[in-house]
Amino acid sequence: MSENAPIDIEVILSPTSKINQVDFESITFGSTFSDHMLQCDFRNGSWEKPIIKPYEPFLIDPSAKVFHYGQAIFEGLKAYRDAHDKLWLFRPDQNYDRFNKSAIRMAMPEVPREIFLDGLKELLKIDQQWAKGGVGNSLYIRPFMIAIGSGVIAAPSTQYRFMILLSPARSYYSGTVKVIVSEYYSRAANGGIGAAKAAANYGAQFYPTKLANEKGYQQIIWTDDATHGFMEESGTMNVFFRVNDTLLTAPATERILDGVTRKSIIQLATDNGMKIEVRPVAVAEIIEAAKTGELKEIFGAGTAAVINPIVGFGYRDDYYELPEQADSFALKLKSQIIDIQYKNAEDPYNWTVEVPLT
Amino acid sequence: MSENAPIDIEVILSPTSKINQVDFESITFGSTFSDHMLQCDFRNGSWEKPIIKPYEPFLIDPSAKVFHYGQAIFEGLKAYRDAHDKLWLFRPDQNYDRFNKSAIRMAMPEVPREIFLDGLKELLKIDQQWAKGGVGNSLYIRPFMIAIGSGVIAAPSTQYRFMILLSPARSYYSGTVKVIVSEYYSRAANGGIGAAKAAANYGAQFYPTKLANEKGYQQIIWTDDATHGFMEESGTMNVFFRVNDTLLTAPATERILDGVTRKSIIQLATDNGMKIEVRPVAVAEIIEAAKTGELKEIFGAGTAAVINPIVGFGYRDDYYELPEQADSFALKLKSQIIDIQYKNAEDPYNWTVEVPLT
Ligand SMILES: Cc1ncc(COP(=O)(O)O)c(C=O)c1O
Ligand SMILES: Cc1ncc(COP(=O)(O)O)c(C=O)c1O
């Protein structure tokens, strides 16, 4: 497909809409879906024609490789409605590029730009009513790809399905977040798939996270699996530490997801004149800084919650409460990024991309 | 459910059988399935009634957790037909126990014994014609469980589906196997899910294995991810090294699948009076032994191929060819274990379990 050719999509519209049955005020993240979805299959070495059709279950063979060998990747981004009723994506190219990096690592075919990005815009045009206005409201976008070829032998599939789902989301308030620094469990191996947004990375976290929940922590800060001496990331967020007036965050190694929010925050912080160091962050230095009072803030950064302040963390037998900050970096950066996302501020970086609605 | 109660299964028989369309002489591993499958769903905190029904695709929501968060586990075992036309399982309790260990690690519900083991026997009774006689022929059994609850939020599902598929298999000859010792990629993290038979562990291996294939190796011997200094396992097999007359194999740590074949071989080797050491196996000592000629054999052990001799291995820029052995330990152990599986020898360990066919 050429870069500029308009993409050829089959569209089957739903005869009815579910939208009036949805209470947009009381939506749980990720549980409500719009009227349509995009679907595109890969067979015989190439991508077939994408189709937009009513959201519905599909038939799949019980021996499909996704069930047995975990060949599955996804992305997560949002569409934001501005005060003039226009619809915007935030850095969708980043998600597109990361999706294909994940695809390569999971031995899956790369998805063409037209199918992913133009297909997404087409889907958004059709289901635009599902993107509600008002800061905090957004339409969460879930592109994903699964191996649908059948056969219970551990080898890559030859058939894949790429899909995009849309899920309306409210301002994500996850309550007070306390995290525990992992001493035993880990999320990713050196030379593993930690940097890929592979389904495989998430199910593996559920059991350790359940154990953390039982101890009163909402999330785990993952550490490197070899020494557990360095802070990596948390659940579905990258993590930042503010020590005095310096922000610290781990480099996006092969074990860490290179977050779009993280990237944007590094840029914004730099342009704000904040000191920021992207380097391995030792657990020991954070503990030390917590003890001396130099540790001012910890926050998570990711598409769902944008920035999520953390109120305290556990490590071994101790709990470290973080002091409230009058000049919170987390809140300052959060409002800056949200202002750009909702077009309430200049976007000097050209991060926002308008979705044509007609 | 009580341990001895006969299990209540709904049975829907297929009106026709596909068996006459199958050429049992030219079957590819894992690609042909029998007429029926077992299915049992977990909802509202408990397991529903299992059902045996015709093998067929099923409907699933595009937001099912298995697609997005990789909550999926499986097992693999075989049914063997003996010379008197009886059907036998090999240590099915081991697979049952391991399945539930995997379930716990992936935050999935444990499957009751009756559903897994009695359900399997019932399914085998119905599709018994699919288990052909003759050493080498077998009926490969694939129990698996997937998260079918919907919602794109990274948290455990509340709904699951357990299934058993049957796939007739021929003596598995994978050709001459050369392996490469991994120096960069790895299979499992410390504190990760390497010891679980989770779908997530397999898709992650496909890309590095493809790179190995391009260099002329069929498989990778995974090393520990922290130092790449110790031999772990290979593809879907545990690995044994024979140095002089001593067999070496890695302990079943949290990074390694505790193979049933491995376990059985350790027992048989011990009872044969072979020296066997279960301990970390350094890459360096194997290279050294290869150079001095003390490395006599390497072989993989797993349900599919039982024992798979390896003819040589690559490490860094060198290739080490293994000498042919007149008194191969691999072949001796293989014939002993196969004789037990097909009831051509005494089974002093009570490893075999008869499947009632009427
Ligand atoms: C493991 C992990 N880390 C970090 C992030 C944050 O990435 P992004 O800012 O691109 O959403 C995510 C995705 O949400 C994630 O799944
Ligand atoms: C990663 C891995 N290692 C080893 C094995 C061997 O285990 P078993 O002998 O129980 O088949 C398997 C399964 O086949 C496996 O998937």
Image: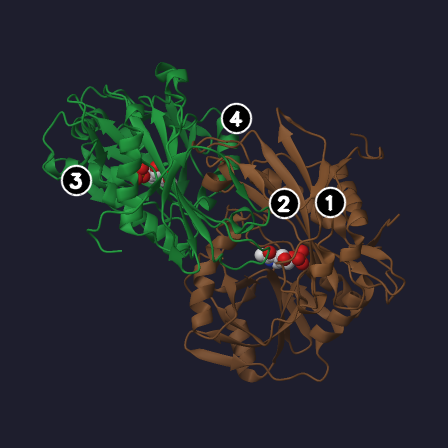
Chain colours: A green, B brown
* Label number found at residue A267: 3
Query: What amino acid type is highlighted by mark number 1?
Result: Ser
Q: Residue at x 79, y 47 (%)?
A: B126
Estimate the x, y position of residue B235 in percent, counting from the top left: 55, 61
CA–CA distance in space, label 2 to label 3: 52 Å
Residue topped by disc 2 = B56
Residue topped by disc 4 = A214
* Label number found at residue B339: none
CA–CA distance in space, label 1 to label 4: 47 Å
Estimate the x, y position of residue A335 in percent, counting from the top left: 19, 25
Which mark is first along the chain, 3 or 4? 4
Q: Residue at x 46, y 37 (%)?
A: B62
Please state the chain letter of the residue tagged with numbered disc 3 in the rendered image.
A
Q: Nearer the viewer, mark 2 or mark 3?
A: 2
For the residues beneath circles 3 and 1, the answer to whether they share a chain is no
The crowd level at tag 3 (other Cα within 10 Å; few <14, some 14-19, many 20+) is few
Residue topped by disc 1 = B14
Q: Nearer the viewer, residue A277 or B3?
A: B3
Please state the chain letter of the residue tagged with numbered disc 2 in the rendered image.
B
Q: Are marks 2 and 4 in contact (CB under 8 Å)?
A: no
- Which secondary structure lies at badge 2? loop
- Which secondary structure lies at badge 3? helix
Which mark is first along the chain, 1 or 2? 1
